[in-house]
Amino acid sequence: MSDKKLFSEFPPVATEQWEAQIAVDLKGADYEKKLVWRTNEGFPVRPYYRGENLDELAYLNALPGEFPYVRGSKKDANDWQVCQDFCIKNVGEANAKAQDAIARGANAVGFSVCGKGLAQDIDVPALLKDVCTGCNPVHFDAASIPSPCSKPF
C-alpha cells in the first residue's frame, strides 16, 4: 500500500482561483442568490467549504464533556444508539430489512404499525425472528399515522 496522499498529483488551488472560476461560470449572476441556500433556521450554506473554513470553528477540538458540549455532556459512557425505523406492511420483509440493518451497523430497530387494524394482526415472533432482542433494543410505534421517515416494508 502506498503512503501517497489521495489527489497529491494535483496542484493545490487557492480559494481565490475557485471564486474567480465560479464568477466566470455564473456569467454575472448573483453568487449569493444562485449558490448559497439557507436552512430552515436561516443559516447560510455555501456550495463548498475548504480547510480554511475550519479555522474559525474553535469548538472542533472540544472533547465530550467539555464546553460547548457539541459532542455530548458526558465524558464517558456515551451510549448512543444507531436505530433504523421501518413501517410494517409485510412482516417478512420488515424482518429481513431489520436483520440487514443490524448486519450493516444499526444497533437498534424501530417498527411503526401502518394501517388501521394492523397492530393486532402482527405476528411479533415472525417480525423479530433472528433479531437478537437481548443485544439490540427494539422500539414499536403503534400510532395510526406512521413516522414520515419510516419506509414501508
Image (cartoon, rainbow, N blue to C red):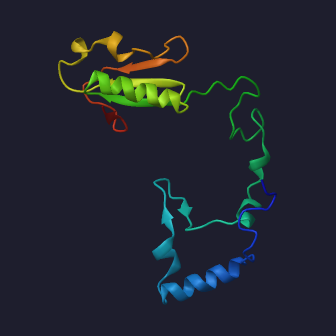
Question: Going by the image, does 79 lie left or right of 97?
Answer: right
Q: Quadrant of the C terminus?
A: top left
Count of marks overlaid on the render = 0
Q: Position of residue 147 (x, y in %)?
A: 34, 33
Q: Nearer the viewer, residue 6 or 63?
A: 6
Question: Going by the image, does 76 lie left or right of 132?
Answer: right
Residue at 64%, 24% in the rendered image: 79
Residue at 26%, 30% in the rendered image: 145
Residue at 39%, 14% in the rendered image: 129
Q: Extreme right residue here?
A: 3
Residue at 47%, 31% in the rendered image: 101
Question: Going by the image, does 83 lie left or right of 53?
Answer: left
Q: Nearer the viewer, residue 104 or 37?
A: 104
Q: Extreme front residue here?
A: 1
Q: Is residue 84 above or below residue 30?
A: above
Q: Position of residue 32 (x, y in %)?
A: 52, 75
Say which quarter of the image contains residue 97. top left
Q: Extreme left residue here?
A: 117
Q: Is residue 54 above or below residue 32?
A: above
Q: Nearer the viewer, residue 89 or 79?
A: 89
Q: Position of residue 34 (x, y in %)?
A: 46, 76
Q: Position of residue 43 (x, y in %)?
A: 54, 59
Q: Is residue 77 above or below residue 58?
A: above
Say which quarter of the image contains residue 72. top right
